[in-house]
Image: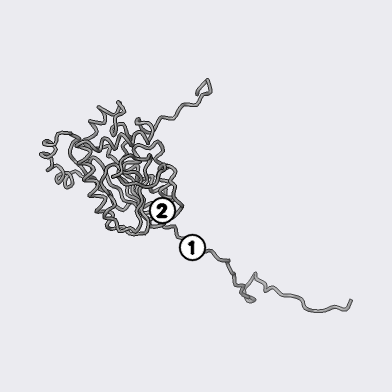
Amino acid sequence: MNILGKKKKAKPFNRCGDLTIAWQELKYWYQSRCGYQLGEEEHALVAETLQNLFGYHLLQVGHLNEANWLSSSRVSHCEIMDFLPTEDSDGPQGLLGQPEQLPIQTDCMDVIVLPHILEFSQQPHSVLREVERVLIPEGHVLILVFNPFSLWTLWRWALGWRRRVPWCGRFLSTTRIKDWLALLGFDVVSIQGYFFRPPLQQRSVMQRLQMMESAGKRFWPVLGAANLILARKRVVTLTPVGPRWSKRKASIGSPGLVEPFQNKNKHDG
């Protein structure tokens, strides 16, 4: 019991600080050699997944590099929401807002893409609640999240305490994300691990380790540097409840039961 009566401060969800600042640093990290190769693989995975999703409206929350991840989407209208206005005119431009409070109407989006938003948000539960709010029934969400159980864990232990992005983020396991999604009424469609090489910046070494990608997908898929989670919002079916009509059956011959009657005899004053 706290004698002074002061409330303990809640520990931050990650050590990177504000999402807007951490996101800008993450974009710079994606310009490094390792980040560039990771972004290329993520671009290919997202493009392959979006080919099988249909609808009228798609929202991507944040973009990490100059590649257009939505180029292969069959959705009619694709929108990208950023956190701060960017000075580069070549990058995709779109809405401005916060993932915890999306500037989108309720039940209007068919697909939402979250590229590494949950690890750097101080309120990841609020982000998923907003996703559930704006998605239509049977809508899909694509979540890209770093894996806490991968070869990158050593770099996290060595550099995470220095508040260096992306190592300072809160890497989330697929089990925890599946529990959060289940509470919000989502069904997980698929989980795919990717990028099985260590986060090295030497191009020649990374090229030599290219064989680890095919071997990792086959022998240790759970040890990928990140996971792509595809989930579908469950449809809540309502069963109409009508009045219960009870048929009154006359059972004169049954013992203990008497047929109700009404006395229609008229009396003279």
Dot 2 amino acid type: Leu
Q: Quadrant of residue 21?
A: top left
**Residue 119 percent location from the top left of the image:** 34, 38
Disc 2: which residue = 135
Which element is circle 1 on?
loop
CA neighbours of label 2 inside 10 A, class few (<14), some (14 to 19), many (20+): many
Q: Which residue is mark 1?
A: 239
* Viewer-nearest residue: 187 or 75: 75
The residue shown at (82%, 79%) is: 266
Depth check: give the residue in front, 263 or 201.
201
N-terminal-most mark, 2 or 1: 2
Residue 75 is drawn in which quadrant?
bottom left
Q: Answer yes or no: do the residues labelled 2 and 1 have beta carbons within 8 Å?
A: no
Give the amino acid at mark 1. Thr
Q: CA distance from mark 2 to mark 1?
A: 22 Å
The secondary structure type at the circle numbered 2 is: strand
The residue carrying pointer 1 sits among few (fewer than 14), some (14 to 19) or many (20 or more) residues within 10 Å by Cα, namely few
Q: Position of residue 61 (x, y in %)?
A: 36, 45
Q: Is residue 113 left or right of residue 38?
A: right
According to the image, what is the colour scheme of the structure? one colour
Q: Position of residue 114 (x, y in %)?
A: 34, 45
